[in-house]
Image (cartoon, helix red, strand yellow):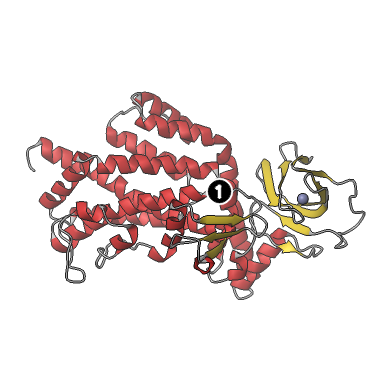
Amino acid sequence: MNTCMTITCATCEQDTDCRIGYSNRLIQPIQFACPHCNSTVEITLDISEAPHSNFTFTGCDSSKNQPAGPFDGTNPFVDLHLDFPVKFGAYTLGMTPWFAAINQLQDGNGGDREMAMRQSMFHSSRLNILNQLYPRSDELKKVINLYHGSNKQLFQKRAAEFLEKEQEKSLLQQDLNATLYCVIAKAFFPFVVHEHGKEISEELPKLLFGLDQTQLGLFIADLFKSGFLTDLQRDCLRIYPRVFDVEIPFRPALFLDFIEEQESELIAGRVSSQDFFGLKDIYKDVLEIIARQIVLVAGINNLYHRGNFNSFKAIDGGTLSSLQKLSEKTLSDKFKYLDECWYNLSVSDLNLGLRNAIAHNNIDYNNKTQIVTYYPEGGRLNMMEGKNVSFLAFMRSLLLAFREMHNLHHVIKSLYYFKLLVYDRHTAQGEV
Ligand SMILES: [Zn+2]
């Protein structure tokens, strides 16, 4: 369903024609920059009383000059839809954001319309789950906070409510963890690729059991004695609710799961939301966590290849003396020390230049074009240094980085279980 309307910008009092495609989200806050003056205008569509559509306006209002027929091109035109990348420009009758999206899927599949429809339905089904979950994001935050609190019984109680399951009575750490990871699996199902996490959860324990158990025990003891693993788990858990806070601009980025990356035309598509500055720090923080998670990957890799978590392969004639030394390296340097790695890290998906630019605040955003310009090398004296990505491409990068963090969280989960179920029991029996 779509609504066509003309709005008047409150700042410049000029008109813009809008076609608003309906998402199934009950409240749809749609934002864009006024094509005349760049001011942010917001139209909120509330479908909670469907079939009636309630519109409210911020920074704009419904124009007194509504078109009697199709838009005639007098005013600038914007297509808007929370769930799909959209285009600004010329109005084409009938070519709604939904139809345009289906056509793009079809083109990407060599003309296979049926496949395009199946992909579109999968996209909708994930978003429908998200539509049910987003009103519960405060509840999710509380459950995650309770995991760290002293009242573990209350954690189990609230988690059971969130999961809509019977309460797990056990307060053993392994059972608390099992509950926690069920909550995360349910809440973040629409964002992640389930098969990736499943593969790690199944394969990593086998790999751990195949290692020298005494050496693995030393690794586990080191990780927990220093607090490294528990701190890392806590910091991962702080990211998850932030993703829910900004689920809206993730929606068109999820659509790109079905499109080849190099289709730059689509990556240049618009997001019907504007808040880039509220999102950029999440990217930086997710990459910081990945940098620390790589230390775990390296420790296991060293155990696997050389039987000692501190033993690195010599690189360029030199070697690192310990895992501690690796943890002090920058993210890009860390990759070098993962020789023939058991974990397939998607390095090319991580934009380290963008991360550096955010960390040093060398970043600009043009809300009219939705182009992010970042300066990986720092200074702005030479404007040639700047690189551009669209807001949509940025959201895609953020989504892929979040997925990598989530996949690597399975390593934390597995090491934690290994400590609780194997290492602690052996230690108690005096075997290590
Ligand atoms: Zn304006």
Q: Which residue is mark 1?
A: 277
Instruction: Describe the element under mark 1 as helix, strand or loop.
Output: loop
Does 179 appear above or below 105? above
Q: Residue furthest right?
A: 68
| One can see residue 159 in this view | yes
- Percent x, y of residue 230: 29, 40
Q: Residue furthest bottom?
A: 110
- Percent x, y of residue 156: 39, 29
Left or right of 185: which side holds 369? right
* Residue at 80 percent of width and 49 percent of height: 12
The amino acid beneath tag 1 is Phe
- Percent x, y of residue 110: 60, 76
Left or right of 73: which side holds 269? left
* Residue at 52 percent of width and 42 percent of height: 244
Q: Nearer the viewer, residue 274 or 173?
A: 274
Residue 44, quarter of picture = top right
Left or right of 270: which side holds 15? right
Left or right of 168: which side holds 73? right
Q: Nearer the viewer, residue 339 or 163?
A: 339
Q: Residue furthest left?
A: 430
* Residue at 35 percent of width and 39 percent of height: 234
From the image, which quarter does the C terminus lie in? top left
Q: Residues within 10 Å of mark 1 (few under 14, many from 20)?
A: few
Q: Residue furthest front?
A: 381
- Percent x, y of residue 142: 46, 30
